[in-house]
Image (spheres, grey):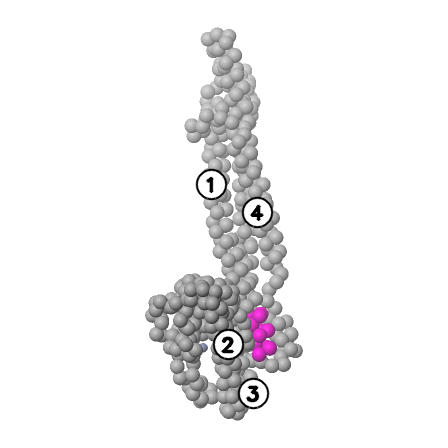
Amino acid sequence: MQLRIYDRTIRKRAALLLAVAVVAAACFAGACPFVSQADEVSDLKQSIAQKQKEIEETQSQRKQLEGGLTDVKQIISSLETSKSNLAAYVKQLDTELTAAQTRITELTDMISEKESEIVQTKAELEEALEREASQYDAMKLRIQNMYERGTDFYFEAIFSAASFGDMLNRADYVEKITESDRKILDNFRTTREYVEVCKAQLEEEQELLEEAKVKVEQEQESLETLISEKRTEINAFQADINDKEAVLREYEAEIAARNAEIKALEDAVKAEQAALEAASNPKRKYDGGMFAWPAPSYTRISDDYGDRMHPTLGIKRFHNGVDMAAPGGSPILAAYNGTVVAAAYNASMGNYIMIDHGDNLFTIYMHASALYVSKGAEVVKGQKIAAVGTTGRSTGNHLHFSVRLNGNYVNPWGYLK
Ligand SMILES: [Zn+2]
């Protein structure tokens, strides 16, 4: 008998517990049980839909990543067939080099973007996990409270009313508690779903990050192979011409062609300025200020301005600029305010820029992997105008920086420091 009563009590309590299991933590953390959680639930559902969209986007980014990498072997074999002369070969190789450098820059940007997205998703996940834990604790607490208050809490709540009106109010109160508890449970469930979707997104993003890192390494390797291929070709070309005189003539012809091109640009500028003056526009003046260092990422001066002994030919030659060795893709800055008078490519200078600073003072930047300004652009001192590369007659990443005054090359060191 005693046992049966006990048993009945247990069962009654278990039934209540079951009922209350639906009941979540209305009173947790001082939250008013009657404030609607519907808004919170719909916000969370929106976040879940958003996260699912982001996961799809990440997946399509991965698909994109899988295609379109530099295939060095294919490039070289197709270049071999069209290698009629060095200039054409170098020009084609330069196109590939530039494309590979661009892809590396894009991948690097993507990696840093993914890394910050991962930080963001991790924070969101952590926040959701905390919310989930506190909602869960609160539910447990609520159930425990109900249990401790006894089986007849609702009954008492209604029938200890002082009046019939009071009783109706209390019945209403009980109903509201039940309604609010159901919402809290909904909220808890949605939070769990959100946690799951955050975890899934994090996983996708991390996979993409790992893949992008691998691709960047592959692309970097391809780039290095292309650069060494180019170096080999230029050296082989040089070795082919055994006669020093022939090399010298070839070399001088190249320099002369380069200078003729630059001279032509200067003449064109003069003609344009004359036309501008005729249209009464003010002529650019150089105010005598010092230059900005044009390759801030440079690691060393690989060749200085002035007379140099050619390393293999034993011929004296004049180097008309300062070579600054710097990583491929690192910035090239405008040394001073001016107008871009050339932003182009040729097989000798590679991608190059020439800036008019006024009063017949020009600066020239050669062998870039990318150009960020076009002819006619007004630039200011320190502005990023190009990226370091090894296009044209160059065997490694560097900036060749020249200064011309009144139609002659002058020592850049007079303007630097
Ligand atoms: Zn140089």
Our reading of the magenta stretch's main secondary structure is helix
Q: Three-letter amino acid code at disc 4?
A: Glu
Q: Three-letter amino acid code at disc 2?
A: Ala
Q: Quadrant of residue 363?
A: bottom left
Q: Nearer the viewer, mark 3 or mark 4?
A: 3
Q: Three-letter amino acid code at disc 3?
A: Asp
Residue at 41 percent of width and 66 percent of height: 284
The N terminus lies in quadrant: top right
Is 196 located above or below residue 139 in the figure? Answer: below
Provide the residue span drawn in magenta: 87-97
Residue 6 makes an appearance in the image: no
Check residue 127 in the rendering and tell me which mark sits there, or answer none. 1
Is 291 located above or below residue 170 in the figure? Answer: below
Taking depth in this image into account, of 82 and 256 the one nearest to the observer is 256
Q: Left or right of 93: which side holds 363?
A: left
Element type at marker 2? helix
Circle 3 residue: 240
Circle 2 residue: 264
Element type at marker 4? helix
Q: Earlier in the sequence, mark 4 or mark 1?
A: 4
Q: Earlier in the sequence, mark 1 or mark 2?
A: 1
Contact? badges 1 and 2 (CB < 8 Å): no
Residue at 47 percent of width and 41 percent of height: 127
Residue 170 coordinates in the image, percent (x, y):
50, 15
